[in-house]
């Protein structure tokens, strides 16, 4: 390699980004770009994996076989999303075991939405419709992220997400058109998941310290508030269509911009959940940790079997 | 923490007969056989493929991106390798 100063390398790197040339694993990149991506991609991976738990809670209690098959397929997709993302993080030099251990020790974060409990079947509807809906809003721009492996993983993920949102909306709309009890159940799920779903986009732009640099690197293409607004604007009419009420008495429609302006978000609640004090934080991590510990013997057995087969082959 | 991590495998998928296998990503598995089965579950849940190749990542030898200029520049400068380099008189067809 020629002797290039760091400054020169950095300006070449930014030039590539500005010209929409993707960065690939072996390309030179500034260390803070690498660290930012490792943090973001592994958090994203953890969210997919932990995100299986609230829905996994209802697989055995799905109301019929069709719903059960759909929910199983959806949860299996989320496992796949986690795996695409852990692989993408590995291309940056992150060690997979360490990455997972960081989740289990609480060092790494995941989306705080998954720290809320799923109390009724209607929550499966609210999650698919709102949580996957919000995830799609976040993930579509990530398909154009400057880091190749992350962008490609997002393309796969986005292709799979649209069924997730539709199956959730179908559950909600079926309940909303059902008996008064079913409709009340759907409304209750919307009431509980609406605000946490808005919080999924992260703090207000003014409070979001990484946004500016991430946008310069084209890791991020839109600000938190922009994406939140887009989500609200598409979701409010969907709720109206199935006769459910958005639980925001301060919400107003701005005739000039065509935007629905939401009331104040309870950011204290958001930060409490991020800090680990949400209703299910401890349980989610306990379950993940136990899964890893209880699977240890399986991984060891697979290693032993692979070694035995390799020995037999070389003999 | 497990003692020995499963190795990393690169996964290539042929989406249909007549097309090349194409790199789709990577995964962890104890051996090649398990890598194929895992690749089926991770990368072909929606009939994305009819054939899977797996190669242990450590066996892939890649060109160095910083050598790209010297490796690929010679191809850029030989424009006479392209049909558009040549003048074909008006009236000549099928060429
Ligand atoms: Fe997902
Ligand atoms: Fe999803």
Image (cartoon, rainbow, N blue to C red):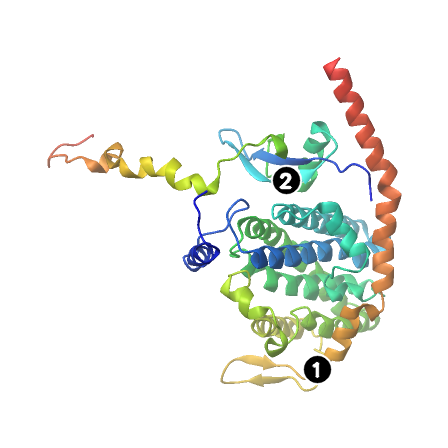
> Residue at position x 80%, y 31% from top?
A303
Q: Is residue B86 left or right of residue A151?
A: left
Q: Quadrant of the C terminus of chain B?
A: top left
Q: Is residue A281 left or right of residue A150?
A: right
Residue A120 visible, this angle: no
Q: How many marks?
A: 2
Residue A13 x %, y %: 46, 55
| Same-chain check, marks 1 and 2 | no
Q: What element does badge 1 sit on?
A: loop
- Write down the residue under mark 2: B26
Residue A183 in picture, x, y percent from top left: 78, 71
Q: Which residue is mark 1?
A: A248
Numbered label attached to residue A189: none
Q: Is residue A38 in sight in this rendering?
A: yes
- Chain containing the residue with disc 1: A
Point out the residue furthest to the top here.
Answer: A315
Q: Give the residue at x 61% y 35%.
A: B11
**Figure quadrant of the N terminus of chain B:** top right
Q: Alpha-carbon distance for marks 1 and 2?
A: 44 Å
């Amino acid at each position: 390699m020629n002797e290039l100063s760091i400054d020169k390398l950095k300006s070449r790197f930014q030039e590539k980004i500005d010209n929409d040339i993707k960065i690939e694993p072996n390309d030179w990149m500034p260390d803070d770009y690498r660290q930012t991506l490792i943090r973001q991609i592994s958090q994203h991976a953890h969210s997919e994996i932990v995100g299986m738990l609230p829905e996994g809670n209802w697989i055995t209690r799905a109301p019929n076989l069709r719903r059960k098959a759909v929910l199983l397929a959806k949860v299996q997709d989320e496992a796949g999303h986690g795996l695409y993302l852990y692989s993408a993080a590995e291309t940056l030099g992150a060690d997979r075991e360490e990455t997972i251990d960081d989740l289990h020790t609480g060092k790494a974060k995941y989306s705080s939405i998954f720290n809320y409990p799923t109390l009724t079947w209607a929550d499966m509807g609210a999650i698919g419709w709102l949580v996957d809906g919000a995830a799609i809003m976040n993930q579509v721009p990530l398909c154009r992220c400057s880091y190749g492996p992350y962008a490609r993983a997002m393309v796969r993920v986005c292709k799979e997400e649209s069924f997730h949102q539709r199956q959730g909306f179908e559950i909600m709309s079926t309940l909303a058109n059902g008996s008064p009890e079913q409709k009340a159940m759907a409304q209750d799920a919307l009431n509980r998941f609406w605000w946490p779903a808005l919080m999924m986009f992260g703090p207000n732009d003014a409070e979001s310290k990484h946004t500016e640099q991430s946008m310069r690197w084209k890791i991020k293409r839109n600000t938190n508030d922009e994406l939140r607004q887009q989500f609200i604007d598409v979701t409010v009419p969907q709720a109206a269509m199935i006769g459910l009420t958005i639980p925001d008495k301060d919400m107003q429609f701005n005739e000039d911009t065509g935007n629905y302006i939401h009331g104040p978000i309870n950011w204290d609640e958001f930060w409490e959940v991020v800090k680990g004090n949400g209703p299910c934080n401890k349980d989610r991590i306990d379950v993940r940790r136990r899964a890893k510990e209880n699977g240890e013997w399986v991984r060891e057995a697979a290693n032993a079997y692979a070694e035995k087969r390799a020995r037999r082959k070389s003999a | 923490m497990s003692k020995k991590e499963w190795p990393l495998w690169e996964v290539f998928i042929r989406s249909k007969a007549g097309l090349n296998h194409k790199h789709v990503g990577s995964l962890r598995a104890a051996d090649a056989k398990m890598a194929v089965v895992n690749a089926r579950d991770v990368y072909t849940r929606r009939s994305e493929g009819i054939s899977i190749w797996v190669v242990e990542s450590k066996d892939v030898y890649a060109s160095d991106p910083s050598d790209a200029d010297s490796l690929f520049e010679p191809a850029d400068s030989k424009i006479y390798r392209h049909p558009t380099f040549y003048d074909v008189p008006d009236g000549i067809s099928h060429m």
